[in-house]
Image (spheres, rainbow, N blue to C red):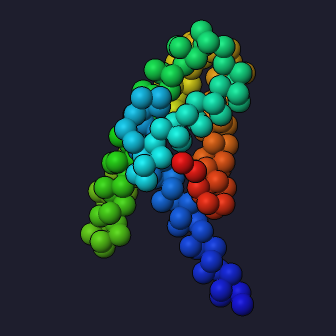
């Protein structure tokens, strides 16, 4: 029984990881990005806009300034994620060496720099309390989508 539970948990975590990876690309251009991997890009994009607008209590003026910066943030995250996946592929293939440790540390530094740079940019356009909530809203929206996918996904 424990083995079955562990296996189910691994499958769920794997699916959540895949969803997280696919969401990185799907949200790279909110609100005017490409269609998502399963044809739900516009619906998900609209849900994200509504979710963030509500969570951050964005005024129309703040929203106008926020989305271009947020889109740039996701583009930067996507680029770092692409590099991380390349290193992970090398490691999975058993070709890892000292260079991959250096590469992973560099990627972690790059992720931290992206976050740090965009915290500063969000704080220029939003009050501090709202700027901090951007990262919480990202996590909350990802969890919302995971729950929605588990219950049948977006409806058309």
Please, which residue is most extreme toward the bottom here? 1
At horizontal 59% and vertical 55% (from top left) the residue drawn is: 153
Q: Quadrant of the N terminus?
A: bottom right
Image height check: is 6 above or below 15? Answer: below
Q: In the picture, residue 136 is in which quadrant?
A: top right
Residue extending farthest to the top is: 61
Query: Is 71 positioned to the left or the right of 64 in the image?
Result: left
Comparing 53 with 4, the one in front is 53
Name of the residue lying farthest toward the front? 156
Q: How many marks?
A: 0
In percent of width and height, residue 16 lies at 56, 60
**Spot occupied by residue 110 in the image (x, y as percentages of width and height):** 42, 38
In this picture, residue 37 sits left or right of residue 148: left
Decide: is 117 above or below 23. above
In this rendering, the answer to whether 91 lies above or below 42 is below
Please provide percent x and percent y for residue 122: 56, 20
Q: Can I make out residue 99 in this image?
A: yes
Q: Residue at x 65, y 50 (%)?
A: 143
Nearest the viewer among 109 and 98 is 109
Residue at 60% of width from left, 68% of height from top?
Answer: 12
Closest to the observer, 19 or 84? 19
Residue at 58%, 51% in the rendered image: 155
Q: Is residue 112 visible?
A: no
Give how far across and how far down residue 134 sits, in percent.
62, 30
Q: Nearest the camera: 95 or 89?
A: 89
């Amino acid at each position: 029984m424990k083995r079955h539970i562990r296996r189910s948990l691994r499958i769920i975590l794997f699916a959540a990881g895949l969803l997280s990876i696919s969401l990185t690309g799907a949200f790279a251009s909110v609100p005017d990005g490409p269609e998502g991997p399963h044809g739900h890009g516009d619906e998900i994009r609209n849900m994200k806009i509504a979710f963030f607008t509500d969570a951050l209590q964005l005024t129309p003026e703040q929203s106008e300034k926020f989305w271009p910066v947020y889109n740039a943030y996701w583009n930067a995250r996507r680029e770092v994620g692409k590099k991380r996946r390349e290193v992970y592929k090398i490691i999975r293939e058993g070709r890892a060496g000292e260079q991959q440790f250096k590469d992973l540390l560099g990627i972690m530094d790059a992720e931290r720099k992206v976050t740090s740079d965009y915290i500063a940019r969000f704080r220029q356009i939003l009050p501090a309390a709202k700027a901090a909530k951007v990262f919480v809203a990202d996590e909350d929206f990802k969890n919302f989508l995971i729950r929605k996918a588990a219950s049948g996904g977006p409806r058309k």
